[in-house]
Structure formats: C-alpha cells, structure tokens
C-alpha cells in the first residue's frame, strides 16, 4: 500500500484505466470529472427514453482490454459480453454501388471482386498483406512503446522493418500511397477514411496510418449494453479497489510547490492535496493555461494542428429505404473537397461523408419500430470561436439528412427524436480543444512523434488520453492510461523505493 494520493483529472478511458491500475496497486486515488457519468467521450445520450452511444461506436483491439483486465486480476469476458461483428462496415456511393467489408477476408475479397473486378480483388489481397506487415512492424516499437522517437523506431525495426515501410511509401500521404494500391477510386476513398479515426485528412496523414485499417480487419466487436458499459465496468472495478469518484466537478488548477505537483483546486474552491496528478483532459488545455500558469510549460507544443471535430446526431427514430447494417458509411463524390473545407477553410463541408451507426443492428436480426442511431459528419475544430452559428448547424442538419435520402435512407425523426452535438458543445466538454476530438491531427510523418508522452515536464504530473502517445481511439487511450500509471509507479519506485508491482516506462510487455 502507498500513502500517496493521486488525483486523476477526467474519467475518460485513459483516466479510468489509470485510476484502476493505481487503485489496484494500493494508491489512494480520487477521480474528478464534470460529467455525471464515467467515460468522457464514451457517453450515452438519452433520447425519448433510449440510451444511445454518442461517442465511440467501433470497438477494436480487444487484446488491449483483455490485457488491462488481466493486469488487475480480472477477465474481460467475466464482465462484458462482446459479440464479433461479421460485417465490419457497409459502404455506399452516390452511383448506387455498395460494398460490405467482412471479418472474413475471403468474403471481403469476393465482395470486392463483384464490386470492382478481379484485378482490384487481387490488389486488395496484396494490400492486406502489406498492412499486416506494417502493423506487425509498428505494434511493438511504436504502439506499445512508452516513449518512441523516429531514431529509436528505426533502430528497433531494423532494415527489414524499414523495407516494409518503404514498400508502403511511408513518407507519402495516405491518399497518394493508396492510389498506388488501388485503381478504383472508391476503394482508395474507403481505405483513406481510416485517417479520420485519428482526426486527420488522408491528404496530409502519413501512409503509416493505414495500420488503422489492419486494426479493423483484425475484428470489430459490439459490446452488450453499449460502449458505455465498458466505462461503467472500469469505474466499478476501480471503486472495488477503493478509488473515489467525484462527478459534476471541474478541476480549475493544478498546484505546485518547490517545482512539483502538490494538489489541485476544484471549481468550488476546495483543494485536494496530492503527490501526483494524472491529467486526462486534452494536453492543449495545459498549454493554454487552463489548469493554471504553473503547469503551462509542462507540455511543450510540437504540433498545433487541431484534429477533426464533428457534428453528431443521436437519434431514436424509425428508418426506411436503405438496408442498414451496424456501421454504415455514405460517401460523396468529391472526397478531397471535404478536407479542403475543414482543414483549409475551417468550414463545415457542403457535401460530407456521413457515418451512421445503427446500434440495434449487426447482432439482432429484425428491427421493428424505432431504432437507435448515431449519425456523424466531420467538422472543423472551431468550437471556441464564433465561426459556426446555430443557423449553420441547422442548415447542416437539413443537408445531412437530405444527403442520406439521396441514398434512399429516410430517417423519420422529428425535433424531439434527436440530440445534436457540435464543435461548440464538444469544446465545452473538452476544454482547450475547439471541439477537436482526437488531440492534434496526425499530419506529416513526424506528427506521430510530436505527441507528448505520459511524463510531463512537471514532476508529479502525468498525461493520459487521446491527445498523448500512442494517440486517439479507445484502445490507444486505454494504453496511454496504463502507460501513465506505470510511469507514475516507476518514478515513485525510483524516488522512494516503493515496492509496487508496476514496471517502469519502457514497453508494455503483458
Ligand atoms: C463522436 C465520437 C466518435 C468516436 N468514434 C470512435 C470509435 O468508433 N472508436 C474508437 O476507438 N474511438 C472513437 N472515438 C475516439 C475515442 O472516443 C477517444 O479517443 C477516447 O475515448 C478518448 O479517451 P480519453 O482518455 O482521451 O478521454 P476523454 O474521453 O477525452 O475524457 C476526458 C475527460 O476529462 C474531463 N476533463 C477535461 N478537463 C477537465 C478538468 N479541468 N477537470 C475535470 N475533468 C476534466 C472531460 O470532461 C472528459 O470527461 C470517437 C470520439 C467521438 C467524440
């Protein structure tokens, strides 16, 4: 047991994982979060009595969660029921064509052959082999490594790994590299969209981000009770280990004394003394001085491009006219224009790609009556300015649902059947971001090394979440939560000879 008190600021994925790990190792842990529920972005909206997952919907990298549960003596499947989806995603284009990708690669290959011919199906096979190698090359030295640098990475992957990255065209943009993999632009568009999982433009993201496609090809699961059930379960396990949760509570300041963390000040003026802080908000909030001047310089800025924000609609309504699966993507013709509008002009795109998560589908055979949807379009992270007006959001809503109708999909929703979230509402919930949902954009091949890692430059202050290494997405944020806890325990070990079970920094081995 340690007498040290750790305050975790934020009950998002990484905050929950850090709290669980530290609680398990006997630290006194207090988590503060402004929401009334755990999960941060993994939140549910309530529409007409229906609980709708209104943040992440695509659950991948199951192994990350299995390892986290195992590290605290639990088994993931004892707590959550996960169903593997046979259809990874249904994709539709304006010319009326559709393509499903499947968990079974042979089925995907066959579907691509029917969709775009045998040559493209062969290219898909080669693409799968390539991204498998890219993923295998980068998982250990980048994803699991607590403090990767370009130099360390090239040393660890060696000539063989460099050869793999070279064959991908790793220094090219993802869009350009995909142009070499596929001739059919619809397939280029489909796989380029994975850049948006990191909040980035395929025209600016490095080709290495194609490893996200591999992550999805490795399996997508639905979580019974919704993604939010995962957040609730992590919270329950942390509580069992003595962690205290204080909701409806903002932290306004991180206090320091003699150049190390000494406590936090909550918005109502209360002070919590502590030896360590894990900050699970966006790192840019620290840089902007939102947690006090004393910690402003604790996270140097190496990349200032905000990632994508979104406009989302959590909907409870009947649908007709299009056979939805669980994950559906409706592409427009001019994909480049979408990213020019967002990253170039900082405007809402006129004709956005629309993602629709039909949360009652995929594992349940028939839908009768209303169903739960999360509809999402990408948007610029300008929620801290006056650029987007209510009228613009309303016009965007009308346009988005009308675009869906062009594909045949009618969503029979009145105003009372949906809740809209915008860059402004995301900015309020995630301060310092302008509504950017994935930290800084991964633009340029060095951007992946520009994220801060779990140790800040202020002793006692640790960082965890989608804005820090290894990046955004639930599994990555979960890994960062674990890395922050391990860095904290490692530092505690080295300064106080604390006999905890954590392993320091380095590479996550379990
Ligand atoms: C609409 C949407 C769709 C997404 N889709 C997917 C998907 O399909 N698959 C996937 O893997 N990922 C997806 N993501 C990304 C994923 O949700 C995030 O990367 C991940 O959940 C981020 O976790 P985090 O640890 O960074 O914490 P966050 O979820 O960012 O939570 C941080 C918490 O800290 C709190 N906080 C901040 N400042 C303070 C303060 N001063 N005081 C107290 N509390 C504070 C915030 O209010 C928040 O509750 C999506 C995100 C969104 C929004």
Image: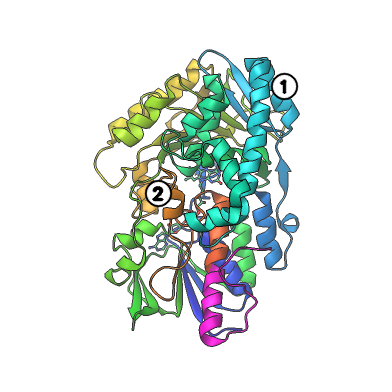
Residue at 33% across / 47% down in the picture?
Answer: 434
Residue that carries the numbered disc 1 in the rendered image: 110
- Residue 376 location (% of width, % of height): 47, 34
Among the 4 quarters of the image, the one containing residue 364 = top right
Residue at 43% across / 47% down in the picture?
Answer: 437
Among the 4 quarters of the image, the one containing residue 431 = bottom left
- Residue 336 location (% of width, % of height): 40, 26
- Asked whether, in this view, residue 445 is left or right of residue 123, the answer is left
Q: Does the magenta stretch include residue 490?
A: yes
Q: Distance between the residues labelled 1 and 2?
A: 37 Å
Q: Is residue 323 visible?
A: no
Residue that carries the numbered disc 2 in the rendered image: 440
The N terminus is located in which quarter? Answer: bottom right
Earlier residue among tags 1 and 2 = 1
- Asked whether, in this view, residue 188 is left or right of residue 88, the answer is left
The part of the chain drawn in magenta is 485-510
């Amino acid at each position: 047991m340690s007498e040290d008190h750790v305050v975790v600021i934020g009950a998002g994925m990484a905050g929950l994982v850090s709290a669980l790990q530290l609680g398990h190792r006997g630290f006194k842990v207090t988590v503060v979060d402004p929401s009334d529920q755990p999960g941060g972005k993994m939140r549910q909206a309530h529409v007409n009595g229906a609980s709708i997952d209104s943040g992440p919907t695509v659950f991948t990298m199951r192994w990350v969660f299995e390892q986290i549960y195992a590290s605290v003596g639990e088994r993931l499947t004892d707590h959550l029921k996960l169903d593997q989806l046979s259809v990874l995603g249904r994709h539709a284009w304006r010319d009326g064509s559709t393509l499903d990708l499947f968990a079974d690669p042979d089925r995907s290959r066959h579907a691509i052959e029917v969709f775009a011919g045998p040559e493209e199906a062969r290219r898909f096979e080669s693409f799968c082999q390539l991204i498998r190698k890219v993923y295998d090359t980068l998982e250990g030295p980048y994803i699991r490594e607590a403090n990767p640098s370009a130099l360390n990475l090239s040393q660890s992957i060696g000539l063989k790994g460099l050869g793999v990255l070279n064959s991908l065209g790793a220094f090219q943009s993802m869009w350009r590299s995909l142009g070499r993999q596929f001739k059919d632009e619809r397939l280029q568009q489909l796989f380029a969209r994975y850049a948006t999982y990191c909040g980035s433009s395929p025209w600016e993201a490095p080709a290495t981000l194609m490893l996200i496609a591999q992550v999805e090809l490795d399996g997508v699961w639905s979580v019974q009770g919704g993604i939010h059930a995962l957040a609730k379960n992590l919270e329950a396990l942390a509580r069992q280990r003595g962690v205290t949760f204080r909701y409806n509570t903002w932290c306004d300041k991180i206090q320091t004394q003699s150049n190390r963390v000494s406590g936090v000040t909550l918005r109502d003026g209360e002070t919590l003394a502590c030896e360590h802080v894990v900050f699970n908000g966006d790192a840019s909030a620290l840089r902007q001085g939102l947690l006090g001047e004393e910690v402003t310089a604790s996270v140097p800025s190496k990349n200032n491009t905000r990632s994508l924000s979104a406009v989302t609609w959590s909907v409870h309504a009947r649908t007709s006219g299009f056979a939805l699966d669980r994950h559906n993507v409706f592409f427009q013709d001019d994909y480049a224009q979408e990213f020019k509008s967002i990253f170039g002009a900082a405007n809402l795109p006129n004709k956005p790609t629309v993602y629709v998560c039909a949360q009652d589908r995929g594992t349940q055979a028939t839908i009768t009556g209303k169903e739960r949807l999360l509809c999402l379009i990408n948007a610029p992270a300008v929620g801290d300015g006056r650029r987007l007006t209510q009228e613009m959001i309303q016009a965007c809503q009308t346009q988005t649902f009308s675009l869906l109708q062009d594909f045949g999909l009618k969503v029979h929703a009145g105003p009372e059947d949906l809740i809209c979230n915008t860059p402004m509402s995301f900015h309020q919930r995630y301060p310092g971001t302008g509504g950017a949902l994935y930290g800084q954009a991964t633009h340029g091949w060095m951007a992946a090394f520009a994220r801060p890692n779990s140790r800040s430059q202020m002793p006692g202050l640790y960082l965890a979440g989608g804005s820090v290494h290894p990046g955004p997405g639930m599994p990555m944020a979960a890994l960062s939560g674990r890395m922050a806890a391990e860095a904290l325990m490692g530092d505690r070990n080295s300064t106080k000879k604390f006999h905890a079970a954590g392993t320091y920094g380095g590479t996550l081995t379990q």
